[in-house]
Image (tube, helix red, strand yellow):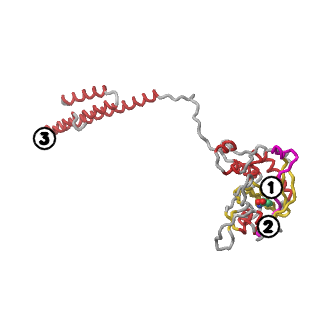
Amino acid sequence: MTDDLATLKAETTATLAAAEDLRAWDAVRVAVLGRNGTLTQKLKELGALTPEARRERGAALNRAKDELTALIEARRTALEAAALDAQLGNERLDVTLPPRPQPAGLIHPISRTMEEIAAIFGAMGFAIAEGPDIEDDWRNFGALNIPAHHSAREDMDTFYLPPAGADGRRRVLRTHTSPVQVRTMLDQPPPIRVVVPGRTYRADHDATHSPMFHQLEGLAIDRTLTLGHLKGCLIDFLRAYFGISNLPMRFRSSYFPFTEPSMEVDIGWNRRTGELGGGGDWLEILGSGMVHSKVLANCGVDPLMWQGFAFGMGIERITMLKHGIPDLRPFYESDLRWLRHYGFSPLAPAILHEGV
Ligand code: PHE
């Protein structure tokens, strides 16, 4: 190696060692290999030499360039590693700091009740079934043995929708979840055990009625089901849901076009305090009965081979009773203060406290 190149190498080694950070390092790199760098300058001077001298000098310069490039890159690697070490040494993680609060959502009481219903009836072998909010009047009324001009159609304050569809059936916002009984029987062969939580609609609005509300329907079809099974099922459900193992219950005979016999169910409570379980007063809570043979036949189920029971109740109502919620309207007002008070933590899912 010629003297000037040996000197350049020695100088570069020294200035690189003195470069303490990447900025200083880059200045050295530019001074040697940059467009006007010392080595670049020497390469430009090759053109003035004779061919033999150029060959020899060119080879020496190329070797020197490789060596210098390696030296410079090695210093960069060392500086980067040192910078990372310094950063890791400086950063401290304080594991004793209290966590920052994370805003978490809450489960709406209606959703919570539906989860509890699913858990309790799921344990009894019922599946969840669903149907559309917009029904035709055959599924909402006719198939359920409520003929046209039957007073039940007026009782339910039905919302009718403008006529649509070629089948001639009128569209309605379903007034109860019972049309899903019809859909389920038409869809699947018995035996059947389903519960149907869902939205329902009636033209009614005050502190205890909303034009949109939720119902829970139940349907069980088998060869030998009796009124005794219906009573047992409702006793188990209401006692598990309210968490009161000796909840008093009363079964009263009643009338629904789609069940025969029909009965309404009352639970014991104290009218004055609102407390459930005792107090000597009765509160009506749901409608039920053995599925009418005409309904079975309308839905393609042979009433001579199959029988079963059905029930329906208001989800808001059982939610208000269980949690002491006095007014129905805030359920739908999306007032966060109300939800913070009555909502449920998503981290504490519905479980069966009392068992079934
Ligand atoms: N569909 C009835 C109502 O909305 C409730 C019911 C369902 C009654 C099933 C008996 C059997 O009032």
Viewer-nearest of discs 3 and 2 = 2
Q: Say if residue 46 shows up in the picture.
A: yes
Instruction: Depth check: give the residue in front, 286 or 350.
Output: 286
- Residue 303 magenta: no
Which residue has dot 3 on it? 51
Task: Give the residue at the far left of this rendering.
Answer: 50
Q: Is residue 84 above or below residue 267?
A: above
Reading the chain from its start, which is encountered first: label 1 or label 2?
Answer: 2
Which residue has dot 2 on it? 151
Asked if disc 2 is less than 8 Å from ligand 1, the answer is no
Q: Where does the magenta region start and end?
A: 270-299
In whole angstroms, how far apart are the C-alphas of marks 1 and 2?
Answer: 20 Å
Q: Tag 2, which secondary structure?
A: helix
Which residue has dot 1 on it? 286
In whole angstroms, how far apart are the C-alphas of marks 1 and 3?
Answer: 109 Å
Viewer-nearest of discs 1 and 3 = 1
Reading the chain from its start, which is encountered first: label 1 or label 3?
Answer: 3
* Residue at 13%, 41% in the rendered image: 51
Is 190 left, or right, of 81 in this rendering?
Answer: right
* Residue at 82%, 45% in the rendered image: 276
Answer with the quadrant where ligand 1 appears in the image: bottom right
* Residue at 28%, 27% in the rendered image: 15
> Mark 3 belongs to which amino acid?
Pro
Asked if disc 1 is less than 8 Å from ligand 1, the answer is yes
Q: Tag 1, which secondary structure?
A: strand
Viewer-nearest of discs 1 and 2 = 2
